Image: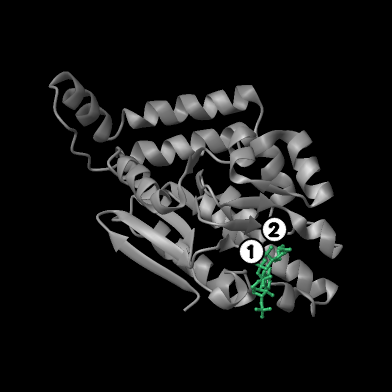
Amino acid sequence: MAVQVSRDEGVAVVTVDRPEALNALNSETIALLREAADELSADASVRAVVLTGGGDSAFVAGADIVEMSALTAEEARQFSARGQALMSAMEAAPQPWIAAVNGYALGGGCELALACDVRLAADNAKFGQPEIGLAITPGFGGTQRLSRNVGAGWAKYLVLSGRILRAEEALRIGLVQGLYPKDQLRAEALKLAAEMAAKSTLAMRYCKTAVAAAEATDLATGQSVEQYLFSLCFAGQDQGEGMAAFLEKRAPSYEGRGGS
Ligand code: COA
């Protein structure tokens, strides 16, 4: 299977594993990833997700060029729509998704990483949107999420040149949030996932929704969303537990349920 999912103590690890094509996203892999994303979103026992690439040298080396080379315009539109829907499903997941970028994250691979909530990179990771070199635009949201993450200047630099950034440069421009030696990346991603998994799932979901609103709306509307979600936290069980645990100097034990 080109996509493997494992679960351990509230943390799921999703691995894209097509070694023969450096984990490139063909239609089958996109469908398997979408299936995995939907299943994990519906599984309340999964409180954080780590996404990584199988093998040593690639996270995901792009959309599959062999498959794309034979597409008609209408098939290309559908391919793009399915890829975009996958990225949106990951973004809308109730749990945080952490990309552990363990090598090439090019084209669809960079877009896949951008659809995660947080990106951690190994020192051998490489990022780029090389589609212009194939005479196409990015098709899985890259032109949109890259600008939102690193600003229009860097987005244009990458999309218009097709140049590849090294991991340190990706860190410098804010494309990734952490950079680790290759052999430590997985452990660091799992450590961050475990920290997030220990938090209130309710507050986690509201925090994701509120930050997403910052990109989708103006400041006043975004603040209204925040105000509403902030107040909703006080209708659930976890806020009382979190604050009591702080005051009693103990670890909290969350239920993750909303108020009725
Ligand atoms: N789609 C389909 N197959 C791909 C692929 C992709 N995006 N990226 C790599 N592969 C395949 C190669 O064709 C090769 O297959 P082969 O062994 O049958 O020839 C295999 O994966 C290994 O890749 P190779 O190019 O030999 O590895 P490399 O280490 O020399 O180079 C890259 C690595 C990532 C620089 C190079 O594979 C590359 O440029 N890939 C395409 C990146 C890209 O343009 N992505 C955006 C697509 S929209």
- Inspect this view and state whether residue 128 appears: yes
Q: Where residue 13 appears, x then y in whole percent?
A: 39, 60
Instruction: Depth check: give the residue in front, 18 or 201.
Output: 18
User: In which quadrant of this rendering is ligand 1 seen?
Assistant: bottom right
Q: Earlier in the sequence, mark 1 or mark 2?
A: 1
Q: Please, what is the three-letter code of the amino acid marked with disc 2?
A: Gly
Disc 1 beta carbon < 8 A from ligand 1? yes
Q: In the rendered image, which residue does mark 2 sit on?
A: 107
Position of 197 relative to 78 (above/below): above
| Mark 1 secondary-structure assignment | loop
Could you tell whether 212 is left or right of 180 in the image? right
In the picture as drawn, the residue positioned furthest to the top comes out as 247
Q: In the rendered image, which residue does mark 1 sit on?
A: 61
Given contact means CB atoms under 8 Å apart, are the residues at marks 1 and 2 in contact? yes
**Quadrant of the rendered image containing residue 80:** bottom right
In the picture as drawn, the residue positioned furthest to the right comes out as 135
Q: What is the basis of the colouring in this image?
A: one colour
Disc 2 beta carbon < 8 A from ligand 1? yes
Q: Which mark is residue 135?
A: none
What separation in Å lies between label 1 and label 2 (alpha carbons)? 7 Å
Could you tell whether 257 is left or right of 48 in the image? left
| Mark 2 secondary-structure assignment | loop
**Quadrant of the rendered image containing residue 234:** top left
